[in-house]
Image (tube, rainbow, N blue to C red):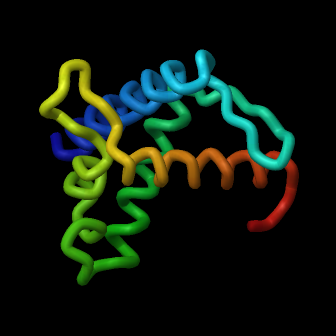
Amino acid sequence: MEQDQLQRLAEEVSAAYLRYLKHKTGDDKVTYDGVTKRVVFEELAFALVGVSHYNAKNSPEHPILSDPHKHLMEMINIFTKPYTITDFGVRVVEHLNEISIHKERGVMM
């Protein structure tokens, strides 16, 4: 049950980021170092679940990162309709996007 809730929360964060990106750029693509890539909803949600578990494992003393649910909750503002992504959420997703593009290019960060 907890994993399903985490997945749904990651999907809400992903949807909020894609709304933000489309509002900001008019598209669902990002560019880093001259490489452009489409942000895929399912891939982003999967990555967010993964990073929240990774950070929980590696930051057990941190008040937010130690809990995957709290970590994802920091990325979304649930008091807006539709939900909006927070500055923290934008930074996390942009970092994930950059890592993804560098991996595709075979470049280490």
- Name of the residue lying farthest toward the top: 26
Residue at 26% in and 77% down: 62
Residue at 86% in and 41% down: 34
Q: Position of residue 53 (x, y in %)?
A: 37, 60
**24 versus 65 height, above or below:** above
Q: Which quarter of the figure is the N terminus placed in?
A: top left
Residue 52, image quadrant: bottom left
- Name of the residue lying farthest toward the front: 24
Horizontal side of 86 relative to 100 (left or right) equals left
Q: Position of residue 67 (x, y in %)?
A: 23, 63
Q: Which quarter of the figure is the C terminus placed in?
A: bottom right
Residue at 45% in and 28% down: 20
Which of the pair 47/27 is nearer the observer? 27
Residue at 45% in and 45% down: 90
Q: Position of residue 105 (x, y in %)?
A: 86, 49
- Name of the residue lying farthest toward the bottom: 61
- Name of the residue lying farthest toward the left: 79
Q: Position of residue 89 (x, y in %)?
A: 39, 47
Which of the pair 103/81 is nearer the observer? 81
Residue 85, image quadrant: top left
Horizontal side of 65 relative to 25 (left or right) equals left
